[in-house]
Image: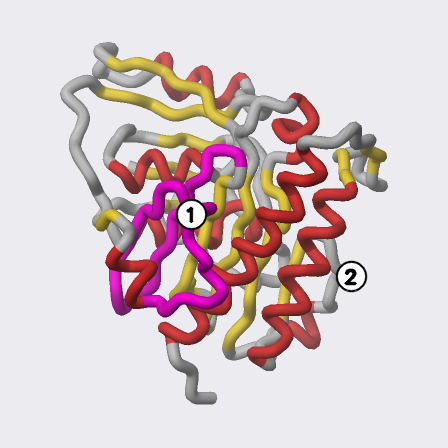
Amino acid sequence: MVINNNILLKTALTASYKAACSILKIYNSDFNFELKKDNSPITLADKESNIIITDILKTTNIPIISEESKKIPYDIRKNYEYTWIVDPLDGTKEFIKRNGEFAINIALAHKGNVIIGVICVPYLNIIYFASNNIGSYKLNNFKLYDIPNISLDEIIKSSKKLPLKSNKEKIILCSNSHLNNETKNFIEKLSDKNYKIIKKGSSIKFGIIAEGKADIYPRLSPTMEWDTAAGQIIVEQTGKKILNFNTRETLKYNKKDLKNPSFIIE
């Protein structure tokens, strides 16, 4: 299969933009939520975003793995050369809390490795994006741009190349909703105690790391492939690594088990 990274990146950016517009309308309304079988919450925003994104990505004829779509057996998935990996609303708990720290994750993986990633943060008006042929970027005030109808070159010209800066102080990122004892113990055992801990929700943490505004993100509590795929390439294209916490191997995608191992970005 021959693909064009730039065309597919633009498709992912368009999908994230349109989904973000829908999500924000719901966010600013009197919405409700329900619980899935695993007791995690889901809102109308998750569902509407998933429909919008998958409808757009289907035009590429590349299969899609999404948190909110029907699960595909590994006997079928193992034959995928390329696959989209999507979280239509990452940080549903943050969305329900109305703290603005939720995101849209869209990634394209090739034989287990991510080659394109988009993280859109609707409330903060930010899109982080990357591919393995252009590097990582941050687009501020994305609502000012007609992303579906402008070229990728125009989007890149309006964006800032990442990383942006390095910190003078050492900053460790942790999850807002999933900070467990294992992560706390890891931080306490660090030899360098001159650090500041910042808690953030969703995949926004990957963007902060990619910008150069934080140094370490240990995640020793459960995540799924759609939580990390887009963020992985955005981080990797700035020179940082996201690694299996125990083996120090890079994370792989479209595995038999879509759960991630514990990992660390450093």
Foreground of the two, 71 or 118: 118
- Mark sitting on residue 70: 2
Where residue 256 appears, as percent x and y from the top left, is 62, 62
Give me the C-alpha separation between circle 2 and circle 1: 34 Å
- The picture quadrant where one finds residue 59 is bottom right
**Element type at marker 2?**
loop
Residue at 44% x, 24% y: name it: 174
Residue at 33% x, 23% y: name it: 172
| Amino acid of disc 1 | Leu
Locate the C terminus by quadrant: top left
Where residue 214 appears, as percent x and y from the top left, is 29, 29
Toward the bottom, the furthest residue is 1
Residue 20 in view in this figure: yes
- Mark sitting on residue 144: 1
Report if residue 138 lies within the magenta region. Answer: yes
Foreground of the two, 125 or 46: 125
Where residue 62 appears, as percent x and y from the top left, is 58, 77
Query: How many numbered discs?
Result: 2
Q: Is residue 159 left or right of residue 20?
A: left
Q: Is residue 92 left or right of residue 121?
A: right
Q: What stretch is highlighted in magenta?
A: 123-152
Residue 244 in view in this figure: no
Camera-near label (2 vs 1) is 1
Where residue 251 appears, as percent x and y from the top left, is 43, 53
Report if residue 45 lies within the magenta region. Answer: no
Q: In this view, does 132 lie to the left or right of 31?
A: left
> Do the residues bearing badges 2 and 1 touch, measured as CB atoms within 8 Å?
no
Residue count near mark 2 (Cα–Cα under 10 Å), binned few <14, some 14–19, many ≥20: few
Q: In this view, does 61 lie to the left or right of 39?
A: left
